[in-house]
């Protein structure tokens, strides 16, 4: 298996809504994307938006994937990922939003992000929104093996991360991610959190 769902090559104005990606149909245990003969693959992402704009990812359960939950951009190439909205998803939890089904593999660094924006080395990931203006737009991002939300690279710029529940549930229930709540690194700049 590779990734779960991919929007790529200048696809625009699509909506990915109300799916279980990386879990069984009940949302209670992991059915990981990203394995061949039991070995994890780097493309084991739940949802990837790659060189595309103005798409919406909402109301999904994205958990149990071996590389990451939701990725905007990529780790190679000259890509532009802009104007996308990631809202009202459960990322790293079960269908109730309370129990763990983490993305990632424990103790393996640099994989297992809940939501990642990656612009390495020459991509541009800009003008995207993770969450939204209302608390109802917020993603619940917990139990992932590394950071809950990450931005990596100088092209990660001008994005908004707002009204999310990162490491806690909507009622304040602790659901910590493995390292940090939010990680910005490698010259990611001018993002609003």
Image (cartoon, helix red, strand yellow):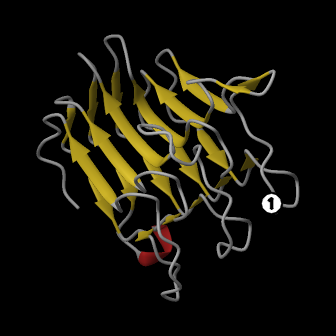
Q: Nearer the viewer, residue 46 or 57?
A: 46
- Tell me the SS state at disc 1: loop
Image quarter hosting the N terminus: top right
Q: Position of residue 91 (x, y in %)?
A: 58, 57
Dot 1: few (<14), some (14–19), or many (≥20) neighbours within 10 Å?
many
Residue 4, percent from left and from top:
69, 33
| Residue 159 in sight here | no
User: Residue 188 appears in which quarter of the rendering?
Assistant: top left
Q: Residue furthest right?
A: 25
Looking at the picture, how far across and down is residue 22, in whole percent?
Answer: 73, 44
Q: Residue at x 65, y 76 (%)?
A: 98
Residue 35: horizontal and vertical position, in percent? 73, 27
Query: Which residue appears at 41% of the width and 37% of the height?
Result: 110
The residue that disc 1 covers is 27
Q: In the shown orientation, is residue 100 left or right of residue 128? A: right
Decide which of 141, 179 is in the foreground and name it: 179
Is residue 48 positioned above or below 138 on the image?
above
Q: Nearest the camera: 178 or 86?
A: 178
Asked if residue 171 is positioned above or below residue 31 in the image, the reply reads below
């Amino acid at each position: 298996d590779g990734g779960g769902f991919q929007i790529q090559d200048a696809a625009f104005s699509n909506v990915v809504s109300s799916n279980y990606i990386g879990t069984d149909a009940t949302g209670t245990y992991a059915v990981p994307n990203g394995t061949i003969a039991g070995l994890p693959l780097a493309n084991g992402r739940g949802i990837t938006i790659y060189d595309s704009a103005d798409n919406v990812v909402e109301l999904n359960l994205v958990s149990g994937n071996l590389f990451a939950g939701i990725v905007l951009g990529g780790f190679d190439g000259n890509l532009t990922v802009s104007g996308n909205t990631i809202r009202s998803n459960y990322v790293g939890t079960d269908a109730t939003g309370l129990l763990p089904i983490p993305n990632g593999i424990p103790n393996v660094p640099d994989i297992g992000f809940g939501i990642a924006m990656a612009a390495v080395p020459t991509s541009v990931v800009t003008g995207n929104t993770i969450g939204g203006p209302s608390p109802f737009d917020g993603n619940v991002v917990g139990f992932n093996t590394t950071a809950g939300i990450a931005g990596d690279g100088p092209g990660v710029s001008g994005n908004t991360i707002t009204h999310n529940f990162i490491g806690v549930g909507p009622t304040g229930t602790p659901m910590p991610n493995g390292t940090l709540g939010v990680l910005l690194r490698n010259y990611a700049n001018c993002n609003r959190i």
